Image (tube, coloured by chain):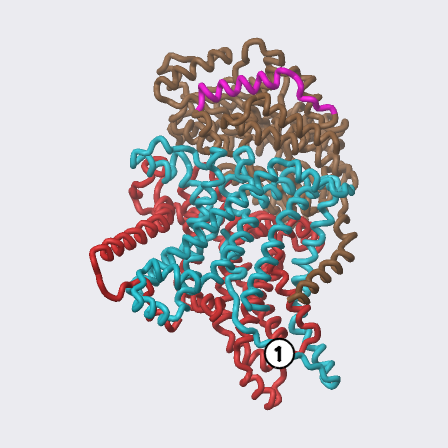
Amino acid sequence: MTKLSAIRPLRPASRMNVWAVISKTFLHAFLICLGIVVIYPLIWMALNGFKNNAQIFGNPFALPIGWSWANYVQAWNQGVRDYVSVSLLVTVASGLCTVLVSAWTAFGLTRTKMPAKPLVVGFVLGGLMLSPTVAVIPLVRMMQALGLYNTYWALIILYTAFRVPFSTFLIRAYMLDLSRDLDEAAVMDGASEGQIFWRITLPLCRPIVVSCVILHVLFAWNEYLFAMIFSSGVGAQTLPVGLTSIMATHGTNYAEVFAAMTISALPIVIVFFAAQRYFIRGLSDGIGK
Amino acid sequence: MKRSLQAVALTVAAASAFGLSAGKSYSAGKAVEADPAAKVEYSGTLSVLTKFGLQQLSPYFIDLAKEYEKLHPGVKVELIQESDDSVKGKTKTLVASNSLTDVYFSWTGSWGGNFVRGNRAVDLSKVIGPDTDWGKSLVPAAVQAFQYNGKYYGIPLYLDAKFMGYNKQIFSKLGLSAPANFEQLLSSCDTIKKAGIEPISLGNKEAWPVVHFIGQLLAYDVPRETLERDFNPKTAKFDDPGYVEALAQFKELADRCTNGATMNGESYASALQAFSNGKSAMYYQEIIEFDQSAGPDSALKQADFGFFVLPVPAGAKGDPKAVEGAPEGYMINTASKNIPLAIDFMKFVTSKEHGQVLSAPPYGQPSATVGGASEANMSPALVDGLKVLKSASYLMPWLDTANSPRVAAAWLSSLQALSGGSMSPEQVMDQVKEAAVADAKK
Amino acid sequence: MAVTGVNSGAVTYGAATGQGASGTPRSRLRNLLSFRWVAVAVILIGWFVYYPIVDNFIVSTTDQDIFTGEVSDVGLANYDRLLHDPVVWTSLWNNSLYAVISIVFQVFGAFLLAAIIEGLGSERLRRFWRAIYFVPSAISITVTGLLFYFIYQPEIGLLDAALRSVGLDALVKPWLGDPKTAIYAIIAMSQWQGFGYSTLLFAIAIQKIPRELYDAAIIDGAGPSRRLWSITFPLTREMTGLMIIITITGAFQVFNEVMVMTAGGPNNSSQVLGTWLYQQGFIENNFGYGAAIAGVIFVVTMVTGIAQLLYTRRRRVQF
């Protein structure tokens, strides 16, 4: 990251001839066109939330006639509010659990003299290879047997269990690269493992923990398969599932559906822009030197 | 690295050892009979799975639940409201996870039969049978429709049937009237198309809209006994020539009356919208959709809304007076902790007073309660529709709920292919037969 | 392509400073006690990740009636049915298409785009484009799936309207309603959604290439494309290899976007393994058969997973 501003691999050092100008113009034009293709559909989505049905069925490129928030307010009151609160709860709770458990595990795998460590490493990281789709049928009855079907806990536990391998992978990599000088000094001072974890290792891992949290939020906020199968009814459904049910129950009241989609897209885009720096640094650290 | 892989293998082996029995253990319920003398205890939570998730319909149960909770402060009614499309998947997920609600929506036919077979529906004969007070308050044919093995399992809520709705204004402008036979319908389509209007708006993204066309045509083209033989997985043959004929008739209708292959990309809701906006001349719809087609806010006014039964093709060998439709209703879960309360709630829902609310706009669902569907508060088209329904000689059930899930799936997907032009009628029937054979082997 | 799929291995790291586990008898108890750090993870993963997958194979050898709860052993009959089920082959083909197209756009396309962006003069511009292209990746696939469902709609959609406005009326069609185009339309949405994420990853990888290499190449008179092929590409090859594997894994787990946009239709033409599993298990009541389809997904993702392990090992990146 520190070298960022120093790299300009494709920029010709000299000889700015006509061809270079043309190709540069072409490149910029290409980037702008691509940018329009990426952003315009999203703007269209937000604008459609301001239209009424007749306008939606009219010219799709037209701007809305009025800027009434009615559809947004309606969408918010007719379910989106509930879906957002369930999604928030599930995302925050599973995010906390995942990061805590992963940090513990990574600590155990890098800082202790645990016997059979390679076995444990293989077991935890092997979970990376297993996909949720494969587990879904048996999980249906398992969740019912545990009395967790249609509760927040089902999703919190599953999101944690399926994300711990990946987060552990990241945090463990980071811990392996951390210097042990501070640990050793603390051991000399008679600190216990627990104290070392909470006071030294965890604070040092802050950057990677933040990246893990962001990646987890992206995952949990958007997860669909488990959410669709393990929750039913308003009050237990997360946003992605809620959106499809809004779509199914609103007939052709498309304006409200567009408004609901826009509302559910916004928070995560805002989170990304706010935490962009951490996010990129985390990825950068993870990719290796 | 190698050791890590070994660890994975070892764990998988160990887990499989203790998982062997767990994979197979889950229980079904025992048969339960409702006791008419049981005292209702008004406390606890009552969960209800409805099919009224649609924005226009959902207030019905929400209001009822509030009213019921007010009457009985100890009771909490929990609603899961699904749409027509999502209710199938949701019901099955709830069944598979043994989390079915106390009261749940059901179609008649093999759909409801599944719950009976699995002992998941309470036998209501003693409370809703024809001789009981509750039974007498409901339309007898509707109660009969939920009869399995001589017992009564369902609480019919409303009657449903399929009709062709049409825009009287467009028809009269072009000098047309409601067609008397199938051929006349097709030629009317040609006239309408020439005038630059879409004759029948049809959205088949959900796949069942075309299945509904086929159901009505099959009732005309295939004798009733043959149809009913084929609903049963054990005796199904699907070899009557009427099947291919009905499919060919539909194909011709699709070619001359609709936008053709594009129908698979459009949702039924947007087809309804096109009709309601006056952009199409006809829309094949359920009676429960009448008030959504023509209402106070739509371009199509109630006075301009007309309907007719899909006309009979010449030379049809089945029943020309059959109408596709069935009552729809609710069942009570045998695993419910408070069956008397569930029954009490459903008596409340099917009261005459609430039946009238259900039949009137904006809901427009003709109540199955005697006196519920009263002419005074229903829209005129609904009243006429009910009359036609009463004079029908046979009620043809929906194909996708009358057949087993596998055969239903074959109908749904291969009829999409027929509408899209990638399958012939014969190929569709081959697919259906294949599914039926696979089903019979089970 | 799932954001998560891309994450799940986008990260490797250099030399692991593994520690020698020396177990003196004195500290054996303490060593055993250190299991407490990993206990929660091991139990969670064992119980909710490994065990269900084992259970899945048991379910796949049975026939279950969800209504009655009856379970009968059918041995390998469900797997036999797999082989003769044309929709399974359609699904496999669609998943493979997903993989191939995603590799073209989200690996090679993203690499080129990242090189172009990193070649821009101003840091502010570079950051701007990376962020803009990333935005769709931050949005739920459910939202983008629904959005493109509307964009592809014949009556209200942007795509057909855009085609008409430039005079390409002949191309106008119900993209999701035509069995020939449905799966391509879904895959196109997925590229739109996912390329920004891999572009960002490649951009980061390119930033790590020492600048001196480029300076030396410029002195040698190498033009931009020459530098791209002889410096940037070889030095990000590790990333490219990893991305290919991750993309394949992701392509075989696709579920959400297909479910939202077509649910597999029309006539099963856009079915993928994930949605066919759902259709069989949860719509047609065939839990056993659904579990057998899950078995196919398991085998494919396991193979790519092991490939990933071997690949990272060959590159001297180890766990």
Left or right of C72 on screen, residue B309: left
Q: Amino acid at mark 1?
A: Gln
- Quarter placement of the C terminus of chain B: top right
Name the residue at 62% across, 54% down.
C302
Residue B320 sits in quarter: top right
Name the residue at 42% across, 40% down.
C150
Q: Position of residue B14 (x, y in %)?
A: 75, 60
Shown colour of chain A: red
Left or right of B91 on screen, residue A7: left
Camera-nearest residue between A179 and B197:
A179
Shown colour of chain C: cyan
Q: Give the residue at mark 1.
A: C19
Left or right of B333 on screen, residue A170: left
Name the residue at 60% across, 41% down.
C276
Shown colour of chain B: brown
Please tell me whether residue A217 is drawn above or below residue B303 in the rendered image: below
Please tell me whether residue C278 is drawn above or below residue C249 in the rendered image: above
Where does the magenta region start and end?
B235-258
The rendered magenta stretch, by its main secondary structure, is classed as helix
Q: Position of residue B427 (x, y in %)?
A: 59, 24
- Quarter placement of the N terminus of chain B: bottom right
Whether residue C10 is in magenta: the answer is no
Residue C213 sits in quarter: bottom left
